[in-house]
Amino acid sequence: MPSLADRSAEPSRMPVLEIDRAALAANWRTLAARQPGARTGAAVKADGYGLGAAPVATALHEAGCRDFFVAWASEGVAVRKALSQAGADPGDAQIFVLQGLEPATVPLHLRHDLTPVLSTPDDIAVWRDGLCTAGVQAPAALQVETGMNRLGLDDGETHQAAALAASGNLPLCLVMSHLASADETTAQSAEQLQRFLALSALFPGVPRSLANSAGVFLGPDYGFDLTRPGIGLYGGRAGPAGALQPVARLTAAILQLRTARTGEAVGYGAATRLERDTRIATVGIGYADGLPRAASGAGIALRPLCPAADALLAGQRVPVIGRISMDMTLLDVTALPDDAVRPGDRVEFFGPGVAIDEVAAAAGTIAYELLTGMGKRVERRWA
């Protein structure tokens, strides 16, 4: 990959992901206001959902967030270092590591004050053995299974963990579970809530956490002591329309404009045939940058029943045509005045003008995948 210095010669042409720091903080405050009886944490795994874990964590810490969730210990170390470099007190933030333990990572957790989330009996054994070897005590979080069948202790394992905790042999700072479909249906969430209430009652006095972004909007019963929003922080759909602000804006530059005639083919595979004379803008962004090939134009066999993604150019929506390729995407700009578009103009592929969830739907995916799939050559630019 070219260095930043190398890239300075072409700053107007490379794809850019503009990140609105104020909108990120505002979304955290909005989510916090929805559950005033709970602390509001933040999922910053997958490099802060593709935006950069270090700047995301520091921005959210400035907004008031003190609880952060990552997938791997190495991610937790990076967040801890970022917060320290930003001047945060080392004991001022708790960082939870979601995906369990192995013996080699216990010293890493202890050295960087990371809190493991224990989801299996093996996790519990590894943590207890590691603490014994180190001669220290440190609390962990415990995850229980309530209906997602992904990670978490089953009923029998939860009762065994409760016995350990009651005997003082398993210090806990949190009991948690995860909602499977809070953004799609309330029925399963209600079932999970009841199951979580029953299992978490085995750990009297231990703080509890259940709600993700969509769960925050389900009402006060789901708030407990700590919420863990993720996609809602970053502007993805999680609650009522308009409740959260767009945070990321993906733009790229027009490389060339041309007019193709009726009946001519467009892009790879001649998959699109023009039904009228068409003005085409070739834009310097493609699937190598994280714009999915499945969002390609109408008539493409990839997803023939779905409309192509739109982009925003000169204040108007214009459709993708032909197949999105590795480095380039074609747009039909026929509806725009000839003098409204020039090479070098920047096109918004998602952001305030084109909702990220809309683009994701056109590609048959979700906003999470779009954000975390942004390529390395897409410059992250904070504002």
Image (spheres, rainbow, N blue to C red):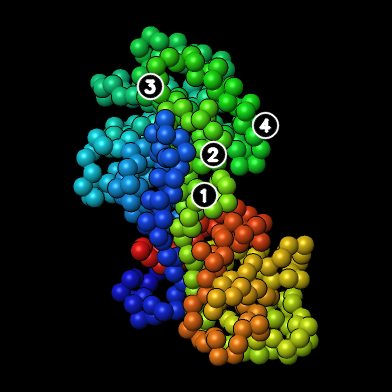
The quadrant of the image that shows the C terminus is bottom left
Q: CA distance from mark 2 to mark 4?
A: 14 Å
Can residue 97 be seen? no
Q: Quadrant of residue 32?
A: top left
The kind of residue on which mark 2 rests is Phe
Secondary structure at numbered mark 2: loop
Q: Residue at x 57, y 47 (%)?
A: 240
Which residue was labeled with disc 1?
A: 243
Q: CA distance from mark 4 to mark 3?
A: 30 Å
Which residue was labeled with disc 4?
A: 187
- Of label 2 and label 4, which has the lower sequence position? 4
The kind of residue on which mark 3 rests is Leu
Q: CA distance from mark 1 to mark 2?
A: 10 Å
Q: Quadrant of residue 19?
A: bottom left
- Of label 3 and label 2, which has the lower sequence position? 3
The kind of residue on which mark 1 rests is Ala
- Of label 1 and label 2, which has the lower sequence position? 2
